[in-house]
Image (spheres, rainbow, N blue to C red):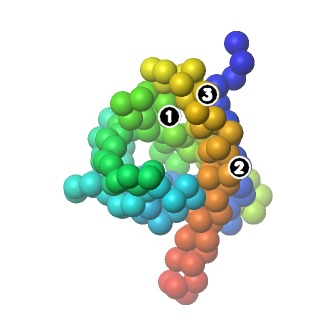
Amino acid sequence: MPTQIVSAQRIINAEPHEVFEVLTDASLHHVIDGSGTVRSPSGKVDRLTLGSRFGMKMKLGIPYTISSEVVEFERDKRIAWAHIGGHRWRYELEAVEGGTRVTESFDWSTAIAPKGIELLHYPRRHIPNMERTLENLDAFLQNRRHSIT
């Protein structure tokens, strides 16, 4: 069976717990989003943990709201969420020389309609968006570090 995961990686000059802190704060997702579709949280958003449900206001042509649930969680190492479509957005963190290797993945192996995702070319289209997200995450962390010092 062909893999149903596409990923992007970047080494970010920050500790894994610093990166994880941003990823588990859904109120910051629109700040780091590289797709241009995430607008803002919908409703109150607590720090994300396994089983957390959260909503995001989105815009892809037309505005809409999507609800997601955190389905994978290992503090400072991995977080993933899925919405009604079943596919997952996953971040994996690994401490390396120079900071943290962050891998963002779009995993449609758990989707309810994986062929539809492929027909719409989402996997290929998501790669540059993930690369921009990791770039934005890096910039956010560096800017925050400089504003503290």
Q: Quadrant of the C terminus?
A: bottom right
Work out which residue is located at the far front of the displayed protein and give it.
Answer: 61
Q: Is residue 102 visible?
A: no
22 relative to 66, above or below: below
**Cβ–Cβ below 8 Å for labels 3 and 2?**
no
Q: Residue at x 55, y 55 (%)?
A: 35
Distance of label 2 from label 1 (alpha carbons): 16 Å
The image quarter containing residue 114 is top right
Q: Secondary structure at mark 2?
A: strand
Q: Amino acid at mark 1?
A: Arg
- Give the answer, above or below, for where 119 lies relative to 68: above
Q: Nearer the viewer, residue 62 or 144?
A: 62
How busy is the neighbourhood of tag 1: few (under 14 within 10 Å), some, or many (20 plus)?
A: many
Pick whichever of labels 2 and 1 is earlier in the sequence.
2
Quadrant in the picture for residue 142: bottom right
Q: Residues within 10 Å of mark 3 (few under 14, many from 20)?
A: few
Pointer 1 residue? 88
Residue 20: give x, y in percent of width and height: 50, 54
Label at residue 118 = 3
Image quarter where the N terminus lies is top right
Q: Residue at x 57, y 58 (%)?
A: 34
Which of pointers 1 and 3 indicates the residue nearer the eye? Answer: 3
Q: Amino acid at mark 2?
A: Gln
The local secondary structure at tag 3 comes to helix
The residue under label 2 is 9
Query: Residue at the location (64% across, 44% down)?
Result: 125
| Three-letter amino acid code at the position of disc 3 | Glu
